[in-house]
Image (cartoon, helix red, strand yellow):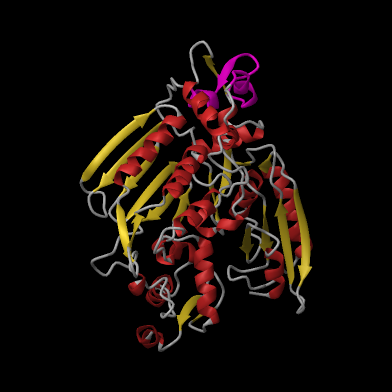
């Protein structure tokens, strides 16, 4: 990757590379303009191929005018954007289109009778689904789902569970005026969605929790299965109790005694459940939070992906924004001292798990997200595989074993490139079930190791795997 590109993308959390400006198929890059404006913003670099190598633009002045004109005529409303030009030491021109995060969402791509809003999902710009579009509309109105007023009034609802939790956590009496200061009721006396979710009589069917203890490590037979419905604090308590029931104790042999150790950190489970209830997408009416416990792991599922459209598996836990989908719910949980306001929940899940006796990196929590889902996976600290299990056996783990120079992803990538030299990066993503950012990193690593080489252009070229690689892999 050229040094100038490394410097430029170092200033951007989200960016796309375009080898040239597509004038006929302008949707190919305008969809990213819509997605960037609907999200956190980002940059498009024209004159740079997918590997971050500068190829340059031949007529940068004409390209700049074309881009500006298309954004103003195709994207509605017109987002704030900047166009900057750069030149490499060997005289190649680069054009950066920087799109700022917009406040008038949704920003639509409008052409030939179609009106489409795009959002960012990992390294791709995809069409917003119904739930995402609804969220963009609320964002454009500067409101959130949990702040919307309902038709329920205080005469119909009570808050005994919330009051008891507040008094226990703060040591202060709960007063009715707190409902308004917490934004659980409006000035007109109607409950907000947040108010309904905290009320004793919560009628929302999607305010539910499904808990299952499975036999073995797959979803085959269920040992224990329970469903809960009600307000958020009751669900949180029910989830904790279910996990406690199945959180068994193991032991570690010390020189003069045995040290008991639970399968899971109770505090880590609590943090994961709070995270699931606070950040879930409550506009998805047909889904609910799930706790699935297997012999080797626990998976907590929450409807709704990352609020900013990124993929958590591509993020550093210490660099995850505290942008919240449901700020009122989060504030109430913070008032109860169930979470911190600065958005450090995922890191706390990791830290609390790491306190378990006998903890190793092979047992660290895993987080993954998709467009409409978020998963927290906690590994059973006492589980020991009886077979060659690459997930739980660090000795045979091709991804985390430092003795092996090639990761499992790199080996699979090499095999695919040998099998189909003309395969594209999006096709690699689909075949290997990883994001484009992951593919780019893996390709860059293999190129630096002089294992693979790109022959020709991105469109007409092919991949060449250096001879002798098979022996090198087997030898390591």
Q: Residue at x 44, y 69 (%)?
A: 423
Q: Give the vertical position of 241 relative to 11 (above or below).
A: above
287 left or right of 107 in image: left
154 left or right of 181 in image: left
Q: Identify which residue, 188 or 297, lies in the foreground.
A: 297
Q: Residue at x 63, y 38 (%)?
A: 106
Residue located farthest toward the top when viewing the structure as drawn:
155
Is residue 176 part of the magenta span, yes or no?
yes
- Determine if residue 373 is in view: no
| Quarter holding residue 444 | bottom right
* Residue range highlighted in magenta: 175-199
Residue 378: percent from the left, percent from the top? 40, 54
Q: Identify which residue, 26 or 201, lies in the foreground.
A: 201
Residue 417: percent from the left, percent from the top? 42, 75
Q: Quadrant of the N terminus?
A: bottom right
Is residue 400 part of the magenta span, yes or no?
no
Tally of numbered tags: 0
| Quarter holding residue 289 | top left
Q: Give the vertical position of 472 relative to 397 (above or below).
A: below
Q: Quadrant of the C terminus?
A: bottom left
Q: Identify which residue, 382 or 130, lies in the foreground.
A: 382
Residue 73: percent from the left, percent from the top? 71, 43
């Amino acid at each position: 990757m050229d040094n100038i590109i490394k410097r430029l993308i170092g200033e951007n959390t989200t960016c796309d590379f375009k080898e040239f400006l597509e004038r006929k198929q302008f949707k190919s890059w305008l969809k990213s303009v819509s997605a960037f404006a609907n999200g956190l913003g980002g940059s498009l670099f024209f004159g740079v191929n997918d590997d971050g190598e500068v190829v340059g633009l031949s007529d940068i002045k004409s390209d700049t005018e074309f881009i500006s004109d298309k954004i103003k005529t195709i994207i509605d409303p017109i987002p704030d954007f900047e166009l900057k030009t750069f030149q490499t030491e060997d005289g190649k021109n680069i054009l950066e289109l920087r799109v700022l995060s917009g406040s008038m969402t949704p920003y639509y791509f409008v052409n030939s009778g179609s009106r489409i809003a795009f959002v960012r999902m990992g390294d791709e710009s995809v069409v917003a689904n119904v739930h995402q579009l609804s969220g963009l509309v609320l964002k454009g109105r500067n409101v959130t789902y949990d702040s919307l007023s309902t038709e329920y009034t205080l005469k119909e609802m009570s808050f005994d569970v919330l009051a008891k939790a507040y008094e226990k956590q703060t040591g202060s009496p709960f007063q009715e005026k707190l409902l308004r200061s917490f934004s659980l009721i409006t000035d007109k006396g109607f409950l907000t969605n947040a108010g309904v979710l905290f009320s004793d009589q919560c009628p929302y069917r999607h305010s539910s929790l499904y808990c299952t203890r499975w036999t073995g490590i797959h979803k085959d037979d269920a040992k224990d299965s329970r469903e809960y419905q009600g307000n958020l604090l009751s669900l949180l308590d029910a989830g904790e109790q279910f996990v406690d029931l199945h959180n068994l104790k193991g032991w570690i042999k010390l020189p003069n005694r045995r040290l008991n150790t639970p399968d899971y950190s109770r505090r880590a489970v609590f943090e994961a459940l709070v995270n699931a209830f606070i950040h879930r997408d409550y506009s998805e009416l047909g889904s609910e939070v799930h706790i699935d416990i297997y012999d080797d792991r626990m998976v907590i599922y929450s409807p709704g992906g990352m609020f900013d459209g990124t993929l958590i598996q591509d993020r550093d836990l210490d660099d995850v924004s505290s942008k919240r989908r449901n700020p009122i719910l989060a504030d109430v949980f913070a008032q109860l001292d169930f979470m911190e306001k600065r958005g450090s929940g995922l890191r706390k899940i990791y830290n609390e798990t790491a306190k378990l006796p006998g903890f190793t990196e092979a047992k660290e929590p895993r987080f993954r997200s998709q467009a409409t889902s978020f998963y927290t996976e906690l590994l059973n600290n006492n589980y020991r595989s009886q077979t060659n299990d690459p997930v739980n056996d660090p000795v045979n783990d091709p991804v985390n074993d430092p003795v092996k120079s090639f990761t499992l992803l790199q080996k699979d990538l090499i095999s695919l490139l040998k099998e189909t030299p003309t395969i594209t990066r999006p096709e690699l993503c689909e075949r290997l079930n990883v994001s484009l950012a992951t593919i780019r990193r893996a390709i860059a690593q293999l190129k630096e190791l002089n294992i693979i080489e790109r022959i020709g252009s991105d469109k007409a070229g092919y991949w060449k795997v250096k001879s002798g690689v098979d022996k090198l892999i087997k030898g390591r």
